[in-house]
């Protein structure tokens, strides 16, 4: 089964300290930011802009683990509103 991704990630310019921004569904305002390590040996940083999660931060040694964490944060946010994602959802639904 394909892993469903509900967040669209957009790479930022190389000169930016933000590596990528994550937008939810068809909405354009970003809900997540991935920050590049500040120096060699430092971790990547994920931040959330979702209501109630605006102070959430997570550090990891690479962006892929943080993108998976963002999917979990989004699911937790949706659940707090009484919504849920079907387990059998297909990409684009």
Image (cartoon, rainbow, N blue to C red):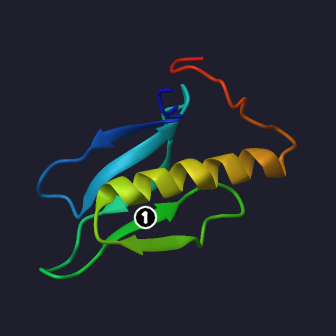
Circle 1 residue: 46
Q: Position of residue 61 (x, y in %)?
A: 29, 71
Q: Up-down: is 3 above or below 62?
A: above
Q: Quick check: 21 left or right of 68?
A: left
Front residue of this view, candidates 43 and 90? 90
Picture residue at 78% right of the left edge, 37% below the top: 84
Q: Position of residue 7 (x, y in %)?
A: 49, 38
> Looking at the image, how many numbered discs can be counted on the residues?
1
Name the secondary structure under disc 1: strand
Going by the picture, which residue comes out furthest to the front? 1
Q: Up-down: is 56 above or below 48?
A: below
> Which quarter of the image is occupied by the C terminus?
top right
Picture residue at 79% right of the left edge, 47% below the top: 79
Q: Quick check: 34 left or right of 75?
A: left
Front residue of this view, candidates 71 and 13? 71
Q: Quadrant of residue 15?
A: bottom left
Q: Position of residue 43 (x, y in %)?
A: 29, 76
Q: Position of residue 81 (x, y in %)?
A: 84, 46
Classify 10 Å Cα crowding around label 1: few (below 14), some (14-19), many (20 and above). Answer: many
Picture residue at 37% right of the left edge, 69% below the top: 45
Picture residue at 49% right of the left edge, 33% below the top: 3
């Amino acid at each position: 089964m394909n892993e469903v991704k509900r967040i669209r990630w957009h790479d930022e310019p190389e000169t930016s300290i933000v590596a990528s921004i994550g937008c939810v569904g068809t909405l354009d305002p970003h809900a997540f930011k991935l920050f590049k390590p500040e120096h060699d040996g430092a971790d990547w940083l994920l931040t959330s802009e979702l209501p109630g999660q605006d102070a959430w931060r997570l550090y990891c040694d690479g962006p892929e683990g943080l993108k998976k964490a963002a999917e979990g944060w989004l699911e937790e946010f949706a659940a707090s509103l009484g919504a849920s994602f079907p387990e059998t959802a297909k990409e684009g639904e």
